Image: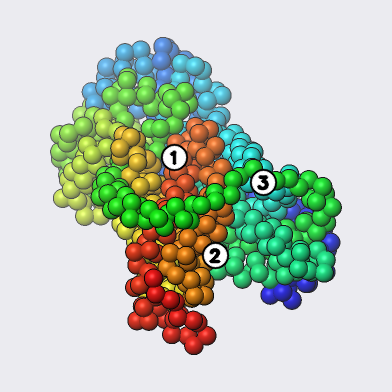
Amino acid sequence: MEKFGRKVVQFRIPILLISIVLLIPSFLGYVGTRVNYDILSYLPKDIETMVGQDILVEEFGTGAFSMFIVEGMEAKEVVRLKEEIELIEHVEKVVWYDTVMDISTPMEMMPEEIYRAFNSGDATMMAIIFDETTSADGTMEAIEDIRRVAGRSCFLSGMSAVVTDTKNLSEKEAPIYVCIAVLLSCLVLSLTMDSFLIPFLFLLSIGMAILYNLGSNIFLGEISYITKALSAVLQLGVTMDYSIFLWHSYQEKIPEAADNKEAMAKAIGETITSVVSSSLTTVAGFIALCFMSFTLGMDLGVVMAKGVVFGVVTCVTILPSMILVFDKALEKTKHKALLPDLQGIGEFVTRHYRVFILLFAAMLFPAIFGYRNTKVYYNLDETLPKDLASIIANDKLNEKFDMNATHMLLLSADLPGREVKSMTEELQAVDGVNWVLGLNAVKGDMIPEEMIPDSLKGALESDNWQLLLIGSQYKVASEEVNDQCSRISAVCKSYDSRGMLVGEAPCTKDLIEITDQDFKTVSVVSIGVIFVIIFLVFKSAVLPVILVSVIEMAIFVNMGIPYYTGTQIPFIASVVIGTIQLGATVDYAILMTTRYRKERYGGMSRKEAVAIACQSSVKSIVVSALSFFAATFGVGLYSNIDMISSLCTLMARGALVSMVSVIFILPSMFMVFDRIITMKVFDFHSMDGHAARPTAG
């Protein structure tokens, strides 16, 4: 690897020039990558709700609709507003009273269920049907255009409106996330490094790696807004210690090398060996997310795995080139690191290891209990700022029409009208159902079928399917609406085995069931893969169990805290945080274990080996954990999107909890299990003829 290092040193100027040129296509790729703001679109494509969504697009030319509330307007004004909205691009149809009857006809002549469904006091409601899916760019553009046309007394509700507001909020906040992460990382590095300039070179090289990663996402077609918001911050946090390792290695090689170029070549060779093996666990953690059925995990996992690889490559190519180019400036800006050396911590831990083992045992049950009972939420709009237009509209829908969700029921076109009518009556009797609307309800007993406009028929019937709209009192993701969806689906299937219930609430119900299984799958895969990596690195059957147990305990503590504070976390956090925390912070444990084994097989006693390993590793662990904390903590405090805020807060806290666990619990584990660790039957490394046998004690 030193040969590679010499090539990097030799071609440092071309490397810097090429790296700068590559920023141009990377920026274009970043700008050209579409961002998906609809979390529900990541559900498996073969489940019934998603198949139903595809049918809506193919058969009815729509995948999205919104309820539009108008207050205090005369009927003629409403008609004019409706006509303006119908002219907006990507608006397929607007269904209101005048869709069925002439405006001169008294509303009281409408079927009673339709009148009650669409009128409340001085408020009336119309359904706006779009020609694209919920989160399509065209639908979001139409939402913005409708808001511009409508006045303050008009409210546009529904998932598409929520997605549009989430997009606007995310795009406004995303650049600030990066600024906060950079500023706090600079602060931490200024306290922990021995040069005022080196933090800026670290951040510059990592920033280039982040842009390369984000630019390469264009080959994926699109990424989720969560991935876009988190990837830069997360990549900064998990790859910063690679840069720190290179700098420390370079500083160590300078006194023994002929010049700084030779020192850097040796440092690069040493860094590649250490960083590649260290990054494997981090990459494995992110790859484990790809095993989720809910493909948001794959979206985040692939992007972050790429990010770690880009981080490693820039660490051993671009950063060394920068350091050599700015070598004189770095020397002039050197200062004494402000972070204390924490002398004596190794001896302190080995002297009190029994206390830390007891603490570990005492915390285990409450941590696991909290971890298993932490409440999660699935209603994605409930924690958004209350002053967003879509949230105000949803609240207005609930207040005026006692309505929180709208389901769509797809039925076979050849299902007889009498059976549809009988089914409708059963559906109306289901708890929480306000109304059921289809062509039968629109016609009532007074309107002949030939009087129904073709546009309305097209909205509710196709060659192969007919559509019923169902208004629900219950909130999306609540137990009540999930039970209601099950009951509606059961009624539907009793009349039509091909029938399908679709919409936000049924999709969210599927989301709850799928991510619950995904959580178990990802946990098993991440633990299994990292267990194997540690086994291959240390050739020990015991060490993987100890290391994974210590980090898993830290995960239990981190994820259990919300239970004791009464905090609900987003569903995705329960799936991805454990994997990210395990993959990103098990490096701390590997670092200390490597030194412990070196000292133990070098002839040191158990206590001496553990004390030296703890003391020599503590500063690197603290710097790495604080860097990860700095990159995520500020974003967690700032973000108004709770999905992002909660994830960053959990990652920041997880870094600190893992740090404390590795510094105090892991050495105590070595003290307790030293004899088992060094037994030949468990330690295959000790069977190597080149390795000395550890001494007793």
Q: CA separation, marks 3 and 2?
A: 25 Å
Q: Position of residue 372 (x, y in %)?
A: 27, 48
Q: Position of residue 584 (x, y in %)?
A: 50, 56
Q: Secondary structure at mark 2?
A: helix
Which is in the foreground here, disc 1 or disc 3? 3
Q: Earlier in the sequence, mark 3 or mark 2?
A: 2
- The residue drawn where x is 53% and y is 54% is 618
Q: Which residue is mark 2?
A: 278
Q: Is residue 18 left or right of residue 88?
A: right
Q: Earlier in the sequence, mark 1 or mark 2?
A: 2
Q: Decide which of 181, 354 is in the foreground and name it.
A: 354
Q: Position of residue 120 (x, y in %)?
A: 31, 17
Q: Earlier in the sequence, mark 1 or mark 3?
A: 3
Q: Three-letter amino acid code at disc 2?
A: Ser
Q: Decide which of 342, 223 is in the foreground and name it.
A: 342
- The residue drawn where x is 30% and y is 28% is 403
The quarter of the picture where the N terminus appears is: bottom right
Label disc, if present, on residue 87 of the rendered structure:
none
Label disc, if present, on residue 337 of the rendered structure:
3
- The residue drawn where x is 55% and y is 46% is 626
Q: CA separation, marks 1 and 2?
A: 27 Å
Q: Quadrant of residue 679?
A: bottom left
Q: Three-letter amino acid code at disc 1?
A: Ser
Q: Three-letter amino acid code at disc 3?
A: Ala
How many dots with numbers? 3
Q: Which residue is mark 1?
A: 646
The quarter of the picture where the C terminus appears is: bottom left
